[in-house]
Image: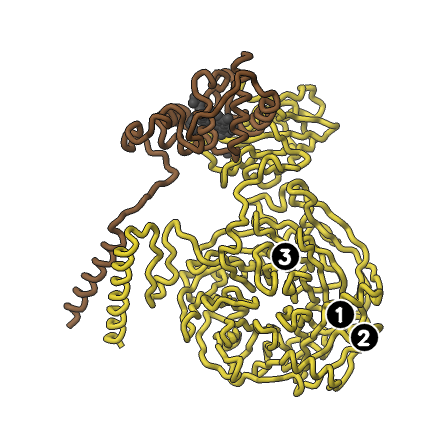
């Protein structure tokens, strides 16, 4: 009596479960994964060079620095970055005095705007996280503010 | 039985299977399929890991003085918001910013008994902006901001003994009300014999205006009434929105052994007050000013120290002195406890604690009775209406000791019944009981999702019970109070879950989560930090000495403090550590604890500044560290403070990062 009914239910459950979970799903989490598929394979040319994030094309940089933008960038940098970065020498994160020689403006902006994505998905970010062992946080900086920080860092690099 | 159950189980599974299959075929991969509904209680309360509950439940902590926040239907505890009691975990009541919230005209009070949380309303529905809660013992009302889930304001209520009939709001949060449980001499600090009760004692009903934009409270006026006990209150809705209702007991005016002496009369009263008219009388100059000191504690800016705004005097309307009628007594059997207004605003339901029926008054009949002058008496100028002209129904067989009623908006009322420990469901059309279910054990208040709203949501009901006895693993002679979650979406009430809570969950409210989640803050924005002792640039970290007062302006980020090596503090100094958390990432908190400090730790949310006061009494080296597990290098987040003798000349120095 009981037996066939139970089997029936089990078979039904099996169907429900297999249909419901057939797809798995995108279980992306905030966890940086060192052993993911080689990211180079999936990143575009642009992303490899200029980072992953909201900046997806080259931006224009003037030869002359914009003093207002530099000032704005300095203020944000002092409030939201300076406790972790020195201009010279390692601190919580890498020195930023020469960052504009080492990286493109777009790369720096993407690092500011999408730090967790950068250390998770970008080979440079993954390497940096392994070295510094602290994940740089998103500091609630908007795109135009990130642009201003870039201007400040460019000027610093030029003058020092 | 078994046969039927497994048949219906099979049916459900079949249906579920088809739905899953159909979903698969028609929509491809469902990314986050919600759990399938079955009749099974476990499924109904199951919220999968990472999924969110549908409702926030706000439960008062009763004698814990706090407010706990739960996800419903999972009954997961989300947070405990400290309100009237100090909380060393968060430094609430220990940090310099929050200590002023605890000041009263009686001094600093570290505890109270919080009873009735009530969410601010717009058009008679909870809007999720603020939640108010009363302190019973030393009468106060607190306002909690539901953007940060923090207590932002505490207002002391003068001339009141036991602010129990509180803190219910009117339909558009024009007012939040208070009422005195104990009548006391109205004149402050009056030293009279207790026997002078009937001559010297008075009751006070309080109307606190709420600023539409900021939520800031302001004690607008009190109504002075005869010396009864005022138990509970509620605002009207829709047609009755201009009115509030209070229950009274002890119309016998007993002041000893109330258990017996206040239970003699057949009927006590529900007081109906037209608050709009009362407010107009105040505006027209009918009030008088009574002296009375009370504290109003709140923050001026977004951050900083709460202030003590000390008030003197309150405007009162005394029914003995005002000719115009704005308050009426509705005779109601017998020591009524709750007074609850149905969603249409028409039915005024009394919880006749000692009565054998649940009395239901009609608001429209009340207005007619007033119009027709169906007045049987006047007490201190207050018209007493004729019972038969206001009553519209008496619910028979409600069980023993009906207390509180909530409504489902579908024509049914649910009343908690204390002595027989059950909930009865009855019809607002026939006034007959249609269903009843047990409570475990001795139920006080109950809630329905979006209850006490114009549009309640008949999904869940929670019974708030007073003793756990054998329900869970035993934890000694005193156990936590329980609550039960019921499903009321079908025809019959169904118990889903039974769970222990915090303190005494006295009353609670539940609001759909989507009315709150979008306004919840994730950080305090650095740009907006207006704390007078914040540092906004890390290079500004420093120490200032003025006489014996030393201020350490410290910054924190994962995983260090600046400064972290400090010398030149002396025994006898009063040290203020102003810690600004420079993080701008959600939920990344830093704390600080100093060895030997006679204080709690302080926890500082991202972008926030908080202050620990420390008075070192011994020389030596004092380690301090971050109490929050903030990062992988959390254990490195530490520092040293050197404390020298009172007369030492060690200079004040500070540094970070140079060994
Ligand atoms: Cu920390």
Q: Is residue B426 above or below residue B517?
A: below
User: Gap between marks 1 and 2, in whole Å?
Assistant: 9 Å
Evaluate if marks 1 and 2 touch, with contact meaning CB atoms under 8 Å apart: yes
| Chain that is coloured brown in the picture | A
User: Gap between marks 2 and 3, in whole Å?
Assistant: 38 Å
Residue wearing tag 2: B324
Q: Is residue B86 above or below residue B411?
A: above
Question: The residue marked by circle 2 belongs to what chain?
Answer: B
Say if disc 1 is inside 8 Å of ligand 1. Answer: no
Of the numbered discs 1 and 3, the one sitting upstream in the chain is 3
Residue wearing tag 3: B112
Q: Residue at x 65, y 67 (%)?
A: B165
Same chain letter for marks 1 and 3? yes
Marking on residue B277? 1
Question: The residue marked by circle 3 belongs to what chain?
Answer: B
Q: Which colour denotes chain B? A: yellow
Left or right, residue B357 beside residue B284: left
Marking on residue B596? none
Q: Nearest the camera: B281 or B88?
A: B281
Of the numbered discs 1 and 2, the one sitting upstream in the chain is 1
Q: Secondary structure at mark 2?
A: loop
Mark 2, Cα crowd under 10 Å, few <14 / some 14-19 / many 20+, is few
Say if disc 2 is inside 8 Å of ligand 1. Answer: no
Nearer to us of marks 1 and 3 is 1
Q: Residue at x 45, y 66 (%)?
A: B459
Q: Residue B483, percent across and down? A: 47, 64
Left or right, residue B350 beside residue B100: left
Please tell me how many numbered marks the rendered image carries: 3
Mark 3, Cα crowd under 10 Å, few <14 / some 14-19 / many 20+, is many
Of the numbered discs 2 and 3, the one sitting upstream in the chain is 3
Q: Nearest the camera: B26 or B289?
A: B26
Q: Residue B351, percent across and down? A: 59, 76
């Amino acid at each position: 009596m009981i037996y066939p009914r139970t089997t029936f239910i089990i078979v039904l459950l099996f169907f429900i479960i297999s249909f419901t979970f057939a797809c798995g799903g995108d279980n992306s989490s905030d966890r940086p994964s060192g052993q993911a598929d080689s990211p180079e394979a999936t990143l575009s040319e642009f992303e490899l060079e200029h980072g992953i994030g909201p900046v997806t094309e080259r931006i224009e940089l003037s030869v002359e620095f914009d003093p207002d933008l530099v000032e704005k960038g300095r203020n944000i940098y002092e409030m939201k970055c300076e406790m972790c970065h020195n201009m010279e020498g390692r601190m919580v994160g890498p020195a930023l005095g020469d960052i504009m020689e080492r990286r493109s403006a777009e790369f720096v902006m993407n690092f500011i705007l999408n730090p967790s994505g950068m250390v998770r998905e970008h080979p440079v970010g993954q390497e940096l996280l392994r070295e510094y062992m602290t994940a740089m946080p998103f500091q609630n900086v908007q795109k135009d503010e990130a642009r201003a920080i870039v201007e400040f860092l460019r000027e610093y690099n030029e003058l020092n | 039985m078994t046969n039927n159950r497994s048949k219906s189980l099979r049916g459900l599974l079949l249906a579920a299977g088809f739905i899953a299959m159909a979903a698969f075929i028609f929509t491809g991969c469902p990314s986050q399929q919600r759990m399938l509904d079955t009749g099974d209680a476990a499924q109904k309360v199951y919220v999968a890991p990472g999924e969110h509950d549908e409702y926030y439940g706000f439960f008062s902590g009763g004698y814990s003085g706090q407010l706990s926040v739960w996800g419903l239907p999972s009954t997961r505890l989300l947070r405990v918001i400290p309100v009237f009691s100090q909380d060393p975990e968060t430094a609430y009541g220990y940090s310099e910013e929050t200590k002023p919230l605890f000041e009263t005209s009686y001094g600093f009070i570290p505890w109270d008994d919080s009873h009735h949380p009530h969410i601010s309303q717009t058009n008679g529905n909870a809007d999720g902006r603020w939640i108010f809660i009363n302190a019973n013992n030393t009468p106060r009302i607190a306002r909690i901001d539901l953007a940060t889930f923090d207590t932002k304001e505490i207002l002391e209520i003068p001339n009141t003994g036991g602010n129990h009939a509180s803190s219910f709001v009117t339909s558009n949060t024009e007012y939040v009300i208070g009422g005195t449980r104990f009548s006391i001499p109205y004149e402050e600090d009056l030293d009279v014999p207790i026997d002078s009760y009937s001559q010297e004692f008075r009751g006070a009903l309080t109307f606190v205006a709420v600023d539409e934009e900021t939520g800031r409270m302001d004690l607008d006026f009190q109504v002075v009434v005869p010396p009864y006990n005022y138990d509970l209150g509620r605002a009207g809705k829709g047609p009755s929105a201009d009115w509030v209702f209070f229950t009274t007991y002890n119309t016998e005016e007993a002041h000893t052994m109330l258990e017996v002496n206040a239970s003699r009369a057949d009927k006590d009263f529900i007081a109906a007050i037209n608050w709009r008219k009362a407010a107009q009388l105040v505006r027209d100059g009918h009030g008088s000013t009574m002296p009375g000191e009370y504290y109003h504690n709140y923050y001026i800016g977004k951050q900083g120290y709460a202030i003590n705004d000390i008030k003197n005097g309150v405007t009162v309307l005394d029914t003995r002195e005002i000719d115009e009628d704005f308050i009426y007594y509705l005779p109601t059997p017998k020591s009524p406890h709750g007074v609850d207004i149905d969603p249409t605003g028409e039915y005024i339901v009394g919880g006749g604690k000692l009565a054998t029926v649940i009395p239901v008054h009609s608001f429209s009949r009340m207005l007619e009775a007033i119009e027709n002058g169906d007045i049987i008496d006047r007490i201190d100028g207050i018209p007493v209406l004729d019972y038969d002209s206001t009553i519209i129904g008496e619910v028979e067989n409600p069980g023993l000791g009906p207390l509180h009623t909530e409504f489902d908006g579908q024509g049914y009322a649910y009343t908690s019944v204390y002595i027989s420990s059950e909930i009865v469901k009855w019809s607002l059309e026939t006034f007959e009981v249609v269903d009843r279910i047990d409570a475990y054990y001795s139920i006080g208040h109950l809630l329905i999702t979006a209850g006490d709203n114009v549009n309640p949501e008949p999904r869940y009901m929670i019974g708030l019970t007073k003793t756990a006895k054998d329900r869970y693993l035993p934890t000694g002679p005193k156990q936590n109070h329980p609550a039960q979650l019921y499903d009321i979406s079908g025809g019959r009430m169904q118990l889903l879950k039974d769970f222990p809570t915090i303190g005494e969950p006295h009353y609670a409210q539940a609001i759909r989560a989507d009315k709150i989640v979008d306004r919840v803050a994730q950080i305090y924005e650095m740009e907006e930090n207006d704390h007078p002792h914040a540092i906004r640039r890390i290079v500004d970290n420093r120490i200032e000495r003025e006489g014996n007062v030393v201020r350490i302006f410290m910054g924190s980020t994962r995983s260090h403090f600046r400064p972290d090596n400090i010398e030149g503090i002396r025994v006898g100094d009063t040290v203020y550590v102003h810690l600004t958390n420079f993080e701008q990432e959600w939920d990344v908190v830093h704390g600080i604890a100093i060895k030997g400090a006679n204080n709690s730790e302080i926890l500082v949310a991202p972008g926030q500044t908080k202050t620990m006061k420390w008075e070192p009494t011994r020389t030596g080296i004092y380690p301090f560290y971050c109490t929050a597990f903030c990062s992988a290098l959390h254990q490195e987040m530490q520092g040293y403070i050197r404390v020298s003798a009172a007369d030492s000349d060690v200079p004040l120095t500070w540094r970070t990062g140079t060994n």
